[in-house]
Image (cartoon, rainbow, N blue to C red):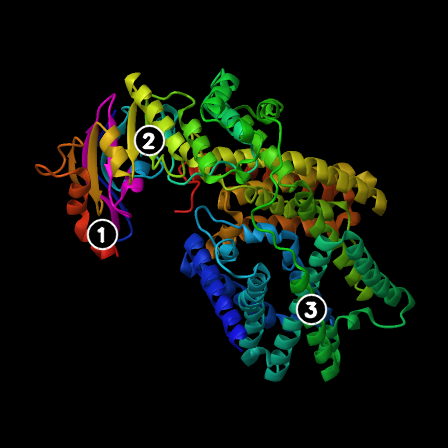
Amino acid sequence: MEQLARHLGLVRLMMSEERRLNASMIGGIQFLMFPVIILFMALVLSLASSQLLRSMPLDQAYLLLHAVIVLYGISVGGLALFSDRIAERRFGQTSLILQTPLTQPIDGRELFAAFYVKEIIYYFLYSIVPIIGGIALSIPVTGFPVTSVLFLLLTTTLSFLIGLSLSFFLSSMYVRSRALFGVLVGVMAVVFLTGFVTKAYDVADLIPSIALQRTHEPLYLAIALAVIALFSFVAIMTIQVKYSGRASERHEARMLETAGSFTFARSCSALMGKDWIDLLRSRTLVPVVSAYVGPLAILALMFWFIGNVLTVRLDLNMVFYAAMIGFFSVSIYSWLNMLDNNAFMEVLPVTVAQVIRTKLLLLSMVAAVTSTVFLIALGAMMGQLGTLPLGLVVGYVTTAYTVTSTAYLTGLRTNSYLFDPAVLAKFSGLSIPPLVALVIMSLSFWMDPLVVSILVLAVCGVLALVTYLLYRRIDARWGRESFVYQ
Amino acid sequence: MIVTDRLVRAFGDVVAVDGVSFRVEKGELFGLLGPNGAGKSTLLKLLTGQLEASSGACAVLGIDPSRDPLDVKKGIGIVPEVESPPSFLTGREYLHFIGLVRGIADIRERTEDWIERLDMKEVATVPCKDLSKGTRQKLMIAAALIHEPPLVFLDEPFSGLDPRYQRLLKEYLSDYLARGGTVFMCTHILEIAEKMCTRIAIIDRGRIVATGGPASIGREGETLDQAFMRLTERTASQGV
């Protein structure tokens, strides 16, 4: 009992810490506005549900919502992969509760368990509750039964927790043993593929929260809770949290030579050399590329799921994926901003704007190589190499546009500022209209390839112009910004 | 070298630096003393272009740091309050990086000279994130002085250094002053201020409450320690 009280106390303190940290970075009101915006969007979608449900049956809409929430849970649950970085996470000169085991008699695992619970509560309140809250607010107009909405809150929460705990569990296994991780993922893939190919069982029912939504059988509730508890327990018990104290690596001096190979970056060559060394020595290059290609692979998987499991016909082509890869490039920029604490630059004759430009240049290099390889591979697999040149233009331009607008709006604090509703609204205003335009054009590509290609290139021309203008404005926007959280 | 006139910096309702006026001449080692939270580091950040002033005027090497922070930083060296060199560069690489940023032609030679001087050969190949606090502090000192600026700002420069390196830094600073350099230093260590500084200012709650030579800043027969306690007594008891 005493231990539980201590654990809950830790969770409460971490919640306060998270709230204050976010509020200090983006402002208290902005921090609270984010869930309000999600709630509003869910409300609008719910009010339009009678129209939406004409083209998609309710059962499929539920399925899609749960699939997205499971994927969301998976995307935020890979805690074990980053446990060291989370444990040593610092914001400028701010230390977090997670660093307490360095100086106090508390087990890192116990603290990480509290952190896990905090993450669950935080994402539940910040994402799931506003989504279902928005649906609930529409009840007077839509007439959704209250019990159905409450039941949806239960099943979506379970879906989120299944995704989160599965991801946490798998990442813990990955850190312990790559072979075991491979076996586990292989078994899961075989189970899903067997169901899909043989139709011996419904693949969707393998996720107990979806089965619960469909059948209302209490057995699935019990299974869902058991699965979540099992994944979480094993993940917590096996997680390896290392605090400082590892053996130091040693490196020959590479700074001058590395900067020398970036002389094309002129005044930014030193900063670029430093970032490149950071990228290699922090072993972040692979996660950066994965964060770029990964969401696209998930998207491809999701459309495969919708097309093959839900049997909704979708006609996707290179332009569509090229546009998407451009818009997913924000994740690379975000990663580059997390490489190192830039506070030491505060005392040097260097501006935040210079560092932003450096990261944009470095990102262009990584993105150019990755997106070219990805689009060539995708083109070959889809038998659409004829549209590769157009796909490459779209990929390069949307990447430059999205990342430059992100850099312009968020500077070096992308993760924090994208939680600022004002910034998020501007970002959405800049990114969604061109994305929607390109998606619509890509879906109608085969109706008249020549005309659509010209239209796509025209959109790319406008995006390139806006990119140039925003790039030019970076100095004015970020030139006087501090490297330190004040 | 440094001139301030009724300099003010406020954070919301809190006035961290409140109407500060003083001058520092070439060749001086000017010490800024004060209790925790008195405004020492904020004042240093205002002078070095790390913070913009709310009001008042200030010139460092004839440049307004609020207007041209980059130009001020080009001309000076700064040891910040917290030692935080880049995580993944080694000590040697960090000094090379400084050389590139500041356009120092003979950076390899200067780097080896500082590594030798501060006895950092053993750790010059270790990433900064794995270095001890004292070694990181030595690196920050080397990074601030490697381009031999005419004016340096030191915020608690002796923090984390063992007695041997404290002595070495004192000797270096004496030599630097003899060569015509100017130092602005924030410190808690009254003994160092008393022995090294040519002039001292005591800041309390954002205001300069006394200035003068180490021997003359207090009342007749009063030591620097006694003068400091008397001038900051009320704040200290409130703080505790």
Task: Residue A69 in the image: state x and y as whole percent.
Answer: 66, 65
Q: Where is mark 3, residue-wise?
A: A66
Say what secondary structure mark 3 lies in: helix
For the image, the number of numbered tags is 3
Which label number is shown at residue B153? 2
Which residues make up the magenta segment?
B14-43
- Residue lying farthest right? A198
* Residues at marks 1 and 3 on the same chain: no
B33 up-or-down from A71: above or below: above
Instruction: Sort mark 3 into few (<14), some (14-19) or many (20+) by Cα contacts within 10 Å.
Output: many
Q: In this view, does A464 lie to the left or right of A302?
A: left
Camera-side residue of A45 and A123: A123
Q: In this view, does A345 lie to the left or right of B130?
A: left
Q: Residue at x 81, y 42 (%)?
A: A377
| Residue type pointed to by label 1 | Ala
Q: Quadrant of the N terminus of chain B?
A: top left
Q: How far is disc 2 from disc 1 in space, using C-alphas? A: 26 Å
Categorize mark 2 by other alpha carbons within 10 Å: few (<14), some (14-19), many (20+). Answer: many
Distance between the alpha carbons at the discs numbered 1 and 3: 59 Å
Q: Position of residue A232 (x, y in %)?
A: 66, 67
Helix, strand or loop for disc 1: helix
